[in-house]
């Protein structure tokens, strides 16, 4: 069996367009999606965070006010920069991912990214209508000049769009987007555009909407298609033809079958990052953990 990691094509002789595509986009994949128990956990956790945050916001806790006073206002000389970074890390991320999604030759990426944005926007409108614009937070002098609005729609939509779109994109883009969102949330609090609990709860809203959408329609596995595997194998100077996706699959691994020049069957496995790490850890345990036999122990039969 030949194993290939899912981080990217091993060959280096690609046109410039392919290199640019590899830097931004993830594998095209075969359209395989899967509903995961972890999505149900994320959805449940998001609901709990939002539910708990509402009484915390209404309490105007001293800890939250202390955080606000520690970071706000920013120095006057960089206040414009703080505001710019907030918009770049919230609404800017949403616009960026929508534009990139339009470049992806997969309608699923565009469709579900747009659905996530609209659903999250709708949830934010519904929560604001039910809870009020500040979720019932009482006005106090310590919050004068600060935006106590809830939810923070820009943050919620950015999180939801990122969680839906990023499986179609490369890992460097993942890191860039999450970095922009992280600094966007921090500058939202520092610039007075959001209160800490409001921002955290809004992140949970976007996270929960994305998890619910993945739970409903499945999430892409981020593993390559048979055509991509064929190209990768060719870059390794290994002759394999008639590569097709195997009917039996396991978690985190995309299994393929093919034939060598002699017509003999060949099995190939493409490991995703999580499965690759788990496989390496298992091999390490097998090499290092070998308990000594004890008197009276009998060999196991398999």
Image (tube, rainbow, N blue to C red):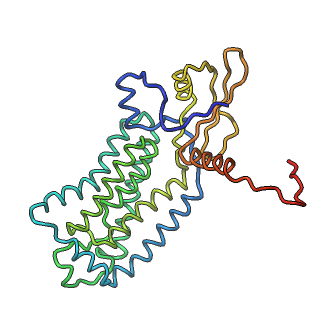
Name the residue nearer the viewer: 250 or 70. 70
Q: Residue furthest left?
A: 77
Residue 261 visible in the snapshot: yes
Left or right of 129: which side holds 9?
A: right
Residue 27, given in percent of the width and then of the height, sits at: 48, 36
Residue 134, given in percent of the width and then of the height, sits at: 29, 76
Residue 113, given in percent of the width and then of the height, sits at: 41, 48
At x 54%, y 23%, the residue is: 236
Query: Which image quarter holds the N terminus?
Result: top right
Residue 47, given in percent of the width and then of the height, sits at: 48, 69
Name the residue nearer the viewer: 88 or 51. 88
At x 44%, y 47%, the residue is: 112
Residue 60 visible in the snapshot: no
Left or right of 40: which side holds 295?
A: right
Q: Is residue 215 above or below residue 103?
A: below
Name the residue nearer the viewer: 188 or 35. 188
Q: Residue furthest top?
A: 262
At x 40%, y 36%, the residue is: 104
At x 51%, y 42%, the residue is: 222
Left or right of 138: which side holds 230?
A: right
Q: Is residue 22 above or below residue 166?
A: above
Q: Is residue 175 above or below residue 151?
A: above
Left or right of 8: which side holds 74?
A: left
Task: Locate residue 129: give its quadrant.
Answer: bottom left
Count of number-bearing discs: 0
């Amino acid at each position: 069996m030949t194993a290939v990691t899912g981080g990217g094509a091993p060959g280096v002789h690609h046109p410039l367009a392919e290199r640019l595509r590899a830097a931004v986009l993830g594998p095209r994949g075969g359209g395989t999606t899967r509903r995961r128990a972890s999505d149900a956990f994320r959805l449940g956790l998001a609901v709990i965070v939002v539910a708990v945050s509402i009484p915390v916001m209404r309490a105007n806790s001293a800890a939250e006010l202390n955080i606000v006073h520690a970071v706000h206002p920013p120095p006057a000389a960089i206040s414009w920069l703080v505001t710019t970074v907030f918009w770049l890390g919230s609404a800017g991320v949403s616009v960026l991912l929508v534009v990139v999604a339009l470049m992806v030759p997969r309608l699923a990426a565009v469709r579900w990214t747009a659905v996530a944005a609209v659903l999250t926007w709708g949830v934010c409108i519904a929560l604001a209508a039910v809870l009020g614009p500040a979720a019932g937070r009482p006005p106090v002098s310590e919050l004068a000049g600060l935006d106590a609005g809830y939810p923070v729609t820009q943050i919620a939509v950015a999180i939801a769009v990122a969680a839906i779109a990023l499986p179609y994109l490369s890992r460097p883009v993942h890191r860039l987007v999450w970095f922009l969102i992280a600094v966007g949330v921090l500058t939202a609090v520092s610039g007075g555009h959001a209160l800490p609990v409001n921002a955290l709860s809004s992140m949970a809203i976007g996270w929960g909407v994305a998890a619910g959408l993945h739970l409903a329609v499945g999430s892409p596995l981020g593993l390559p298609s048979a055509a991509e595997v064929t190209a990768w194998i060719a870059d390794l100077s290994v002759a394999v033809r008639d590569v097709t996706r195997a009917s039996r699959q396991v978690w985190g691994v995309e299994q393929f079958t093919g034939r060598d020049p002699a017509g003999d069957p060949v099995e190939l496995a493409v490991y995703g990052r999580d499965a690759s790490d788990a496989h390496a850890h298992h091999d390490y345990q097998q090499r290092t953990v070998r308990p000594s036999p004890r008197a009276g122990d009998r060999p196991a039969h398999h």
